[in-house]
């Protein structure tokens, strides 16, 4: 009996870690205590940088557009704006196909285009910086031939309201009602013919040629140099 009692006492004296752990984990809630405010806070810091990233991408695209415009200004003879408000995607794609490789169409915001033009001879295009413009960069001296594709497209699609908004040629701004002057500029062949006629004419006619615009004078000089080279080649061939 004594041994049994001792064993029983010892069994009650031994702590049960399982029971204590159970009570610690399942401690009853005091119903008289008011529940306090939750301390859970969502991890909002993950989203704080998204606007900054978006802004950085936007700035990058703007800088890329400005750089593209500046690149197109190299060896550019004429820059014109075209009102493309109301154009469909299909119409714009068709318009691109009508231009030769010597011209380039670029859709860009007025503010970005003018940023690229500031401080250059092209900044006189400022009156065009309103409305919706697509920009035509002409990289050839044949200005009438470069403008003609859009005139034909405009008539074919009946886009009377989508006219040129202006252009800059040789540093001078041309308003929409002055485009006739650009569209009737003499071609290179006509200038060459004018030169040859001037060389055979009296001195007064040659003076008149020299007083022509810079573009015509430059082409005249090029034609004269070419004529001299051809005469030298012909003379050398006859001597042999």
Image (cartoon, helix red, strand yellow):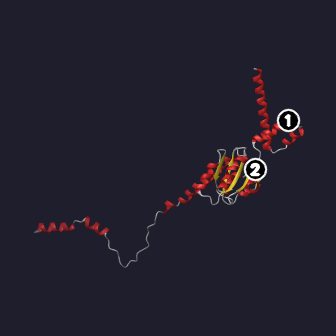
* x then y, percent, for residue 135: 67, 53
Q: Front-most of 8 and 131?
A: 131
Please give the name of the residue rendered at 78% of the width and 41% of the height, measured from the top-left corner.
191
Q: Is residue 42 above or below residue 155?
A: below
Mark 2 highlights which residue? 182
Q: Callout 2: helix, strand or loop?
A: helix
Q: Front-most of 102 and 75?
A: 102
Q: Farthest residue in the top direction?
A: 240
Q: Farthest residue in the left direction?
A: 1
Q: Front-most of 21 and 165?
A: 165
Q: Is residue 121 above or below residue 35?
A: above
* x then y, percent, for residue 19: 26, 67
Please give the name of the residue rendered at 72% of the width and 44% of the height, measured from the top-left corner.
142
Please give the name of the residue rendered at 70% of the width and 52% of the height, measured from the top-left corner.
80
Inspect this view and state whether residue 67 appears.
no
**Disc 2 packing (10 Å; few <14; some 14–19; many ≥20):** some
* Of the two numbered discs 1 and 2 in the rendering, the one whose residue sits closer to the viewer: 1
Quarter of the N terminus within the rendering:
bottom left
Quarter of the C terminus within the rendering:
top right
Q: Front-most of 204 and 8?
A: 204
Q: Is residue 86 above or below residue 101?
A: below
In this picture, residue 24 sits left or right of residue 222: left
Mark 1 highlights which residue? 200
* x then y, percent, for residue 220: 79, 39
Indicate which disc, 1 or 2, sits on the residue closer to the N terminus: 2
Residue 192: which numbered mark, if any?
Answer: none
Inspect this view and state whether residue 125 appears.
yes
């Amino acid at each position: 009996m004594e041994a049994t009692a001792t064993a029983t006492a010892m069994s009650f004296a031994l702590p049960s870690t399982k029971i204590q752990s159970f009570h610690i984990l399942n401690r009853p809630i005091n119903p008289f205590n008011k529940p306090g405010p939750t301390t859970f806070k969502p991890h909002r810091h993950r989203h704080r940088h998204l606007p900054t990233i978006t802004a950085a991408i936007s700035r990058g695209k703007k800088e890329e557009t400005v750089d593209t415009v500046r690149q197109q200004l190299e060896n550019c003879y004429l820059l014109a704006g075209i009102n493309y408000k109301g154009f469909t995607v299909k119409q714009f794609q068709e318009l691109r196909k009508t231009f030769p490789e010597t011209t380039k169409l670029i859709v860009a915001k007025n503010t970005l285009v003018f940023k690229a033009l500031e401080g250059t001879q092209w900044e006189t295009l400022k009156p065009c910086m309103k409305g919706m413009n697509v920009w035509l960069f002409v990289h050839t001296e044949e200005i009438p031939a470069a403008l003609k594709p859009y005139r034909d497209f405009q008539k074919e699609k009946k886009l009377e309201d989508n006219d040129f908004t202006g252009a800059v040629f040789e540093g001078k701004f041309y308003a929409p009602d002055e485009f006739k002057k650009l569209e009737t500029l003499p071609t290179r062949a006509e200038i060459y013919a004018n030169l040859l006629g001037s060389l055979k004419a009296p001195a007064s006619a040659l003076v008149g040629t020299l007083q022509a615009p810079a573009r015509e004078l430059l082409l005249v000089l090029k034609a004269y140099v070419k004529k001299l080279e051809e005469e030298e080649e012909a003379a050398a061939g006859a001597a042999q």
